[in-house]
Image (cartoon, coloured by chain):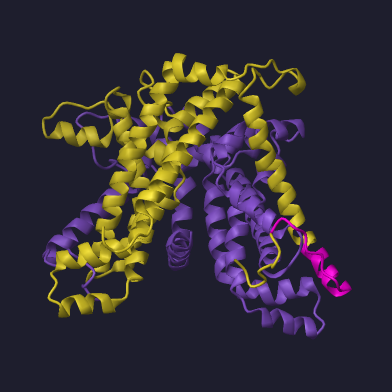
Chain colours: A yellow, B purple
Amino acid sequence: MSSHASKTAWWLPEIPKSALMRRRMLWAYVFVSAPIVALLVFLLGPILFSGWVSLHRWDMLSPVNEMPWRGLSNYSYLLTKDPVFLKSLGNTFLFAIGGVGANTALGLGFALLLNSRIRGRTVWRVLYFMPVITAPLALAVMFSFIFNRNYGVVNNVITAFGLPRQPFLSGPSQALMTLVFIAIYQYVGYYIVIFLAGLQGIPQDYYDAAQVDGAGKWQEFRFITLPLLRPVMLFVVVTNTIGALQVFDLVFATTGGAPANSSMTVVLHMYNTAFKFSRMGRASAMAFILFAIIMLITIVQVRLLRDRTYQD
Amino acid sequence: MSDHSSPLQPMGSAVKYLVLFGGAFVMVFPFVWMIIASLMTAGEIQLRPPVWLPAEPQFGNYIDLTESIPIGRLYFNSLFTSGLIVFGVLLSSSLAGFAFAKYRFPGREALFYLILATMMIPFFVTLIPVFFIVRQLGWIDTYQGLVVPGLTSAYGIFLMRQFIVSLPDELIDAARIDGASELRIFWRIVLPLVKPALATLGTFTFIGSWNAFLWPLLVINSRELMTLPLGINSMKSLYADNTNLLMAGTAVAVIPMLFVFIFLQRYFIKGIALTGLKG
């Protein structure tokens, strides 16, 4: 793992013998101390505390040591009696599937285009990347206007062609799909850049060899590009899925989960449960359910997509 | 650049440019439309049949805006807090990454595994407890409440460790023989050699905290401490009936950042490709 691979097992302390080495060791502790303390206070401690809270009823105002114990009832309530939670879980899955599928396909497609003989590669890349660095909140405001039912530009164009107005973000059957569109708009540029870097990392020799063997363009793509892009594909699918399952800003600032919870997502429902209704126990249980789902999906994706031999 | 890696080669080049242009149009249009709408009157936006350009550009919208929105204050708060967070993350990540990469000390492996484990914890799992801690500390509606929880990054430590571990040990040993102190070695030898990694981590951290919304929303209440995304959020209700002013405000909040990006795009994109592939 490192140049100083220790001979003893990692859990056994290895105390250096010389005074000089001991002083260096002390410096190392100085260097890691502040970050470690910060991670304990703001990450590790909180996740343990959050697990503890999820087994209680708590409004964050009553003292921590007086929280009434609820066992697993927060979890069972969420999974059997909270229709909004189940709805938000389904919405979040749909949002992630739509976004990840489209971002992967479009990201790879446009990366291939930009990797071919093309003029102005930098300019194209910059244009596609602009939404990536823009605050999700700003995009939410822009698209709420663009998709407005009464005076949004999309509806202006649609009606100019004599077609009926669409509700988009304000329609129960369209809100979630409109959010998926905005999420694709926001992140596709990021995945184009990642795929493009991956494509440029594939050695030219492989393609030269394939040409000697008389392979066609499609065969080159199928048997060289795709297999060699597997690690990049894994990165794109896993990070995009993890991110999409946690969506908050965009939904909060466009629909707020409306209409009729048709675009409610898990983190937004958790936020409302905790900070609007002061049900910290139930909200923490929600967080743990989503966390478990994210870990499960990540493990499955890594197993399916990790590097195997180059033949399927 | 050769064409070999693309199965799209048979596609005529006109079609390629058409597809690229179509995509770019979708990408750029919302920004353009935001600016056009910001120059309309409130009435023009809702006209039927719709108009595509203002009869006369209403530059005054931007002046009206500054009368009710403290734009300068929003920018200061965003710059100040993002700057502190970037500084804290770079310093803590490179120091800890240096220690994990180049020192032997009891518990090193265990602590590093701890960091790898915390890297995978999503923000929403710790949101409630961290909010509780910050409130107990009396930091609600303060800069420290906004900044302190973000000063360390497990991912940053991991990234810096990966870069520093590849630096040759001889370099550090030679400096020690010359009598350089450990801090001096860090500052004068290690840091200059990992500048690309620092630039990448700094860029990521900056974009993240510049655009952050949920945490500031929870911690900050007063207008004096609002960051740009919070400002946009409050404009949403303030200008519910004045989409033109809402668009002007959003434009003021995002366009300068876009220019910074265009100016520095080479570094942005290089860094993103770098960490993307390393991660």
- Between B80 and B150, the one lying in front of the other is B150
**Residue B51 location, x and y as percent?**
23, 37
Residue at 21% from the left image edge and 34% from the top image edge:
A156
**What is the magenta range?**
A10-28
* Camera sees residue B20: yes
- Between A80 and A240, the one lying in front of the other is A80
In the image, residue A15 sits, relative to residue A189, either above or below, namely below
Q: Give left or right: position of B219 versus A115.
A: right
- Between B209 and A210, the one lying in front of the other is A210
Q: Residue furthest right?
A: A19
Residue A11: in magenta span = yes
**Residue B151 location, x and y as percent?**
67, 50
**Residue A202 location, x and y as percent?**
32, 71
In the image, residue B161 sits, relative to residue B27, either above or below, namely below
Q: Where on the picture, by quarter, is residue A151? A: top left
Q: Where on the picture, by quarter, is residue B2? A: bottom left
- Between B267 and A79, the one lying in front of the other is A79
Q: Residue furthest front?
A: A8
In the image, residue B96 sits, relative to residue A117, either above or below, namely above
Q: If the image is split into quadrants, where does the N terminus of chain B sit?
A: bottom left
* Camera sees residue B1: no
**Residue A196 location, x and y as percent?**
33, 64
Residue at 56% from the left image edge and 54% from the top image edge:
B206
Residue A78: in magenta span = no
Residue at 44% from the left image edge and 44% from the top image edge:
A298
